Amino acid sequence: MSEGIKKIKRSAIFVDLGFMEYSRVLDLQIEAVSLKTEKRNLPDIVFFVEHPWVFTLGKQGGRENLTVSEQFLKQKDI
């Protein structure tokens, strides 16, 4: 190892959340960051999660940019 470079030993907790709404996971992430900020010696946390499907549109995007029908969106509860 080069001089001046410190080797840092870190630990992590891996959490499988399964299938969960984005907003619930975001709340958990914010809470985890808050705890880690308060107590730096806590292990890092890595969340594994699957969110419901989404269509992502840019700032200028709108429904007119989707290539699926309104019927399809209703069938999928989108």
Image (cartoon, rainbow, N blue to C red):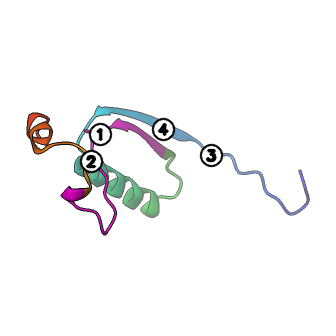
- Mark 2 or 4, closer to the camera: 2
Residue that numbered label 1 is attached to = 51
Disc marking residue 32: none
Where disc 1 sits, the SS reads loop
Tell me which corner region of the image, top left, top right, bottom left or bottom right, holds residue 11.
top right
Are the residues at dot 3 and dot 2 in contact (C-beta closer than 8 Å)? Answer: no
Which residue is drawn at the image coordinates 31% and 58% (left, top)? 57
* Residue situated furthest bottom in the rendering: 60
Q: Earlier in the sequence, mark 4 or mark 1?
A: 4
- Mark 1 or 3, closer to the camera: 1
Which residue is drawn at the image coordinates 30% and 53% (left, top)? 26
- Mark 4 or 1, closer to the camera: 1
Are the residues at dot 1 and dot 3 in contact (C-beta closer than 8 Å)? Answer: no
For label 4, the crowd category at 10 Å Cα-Cα, with few meaning under 14, some 14 to 19 and many 20 or more, is: few
Tell me which corner region of the image, top left, top right, bottom left or bottom right, holds residue 21.
top left
**Which quarter of the rendered picture does the C terminus lie within?**
top left
Q: Amino acid at mark 1?
A: His
Q: CA distance from mark 4 to mark 1?
A: 20 Å
Residue that numbered label 4 is attached to = 13
| Rendered location of residue 27, percent (x, y) | 27, 54
Disc marking residue 10: 3
Q: Amino acid at mark 4?
A: Ile
Magenta part of the chain: 45-64
| Rendered location of residue 36, percent (x, y) | 45, 57
Residue that numbered label 2 is attached to = 22
Are the residues at dot 2 and dot 1 in contact (C-beta closer than 8 Å)? Answer: yes
Q: Earlier in the sequence, mark 2 or mark 4?
A: 4
In front here: 2 or 76? 76
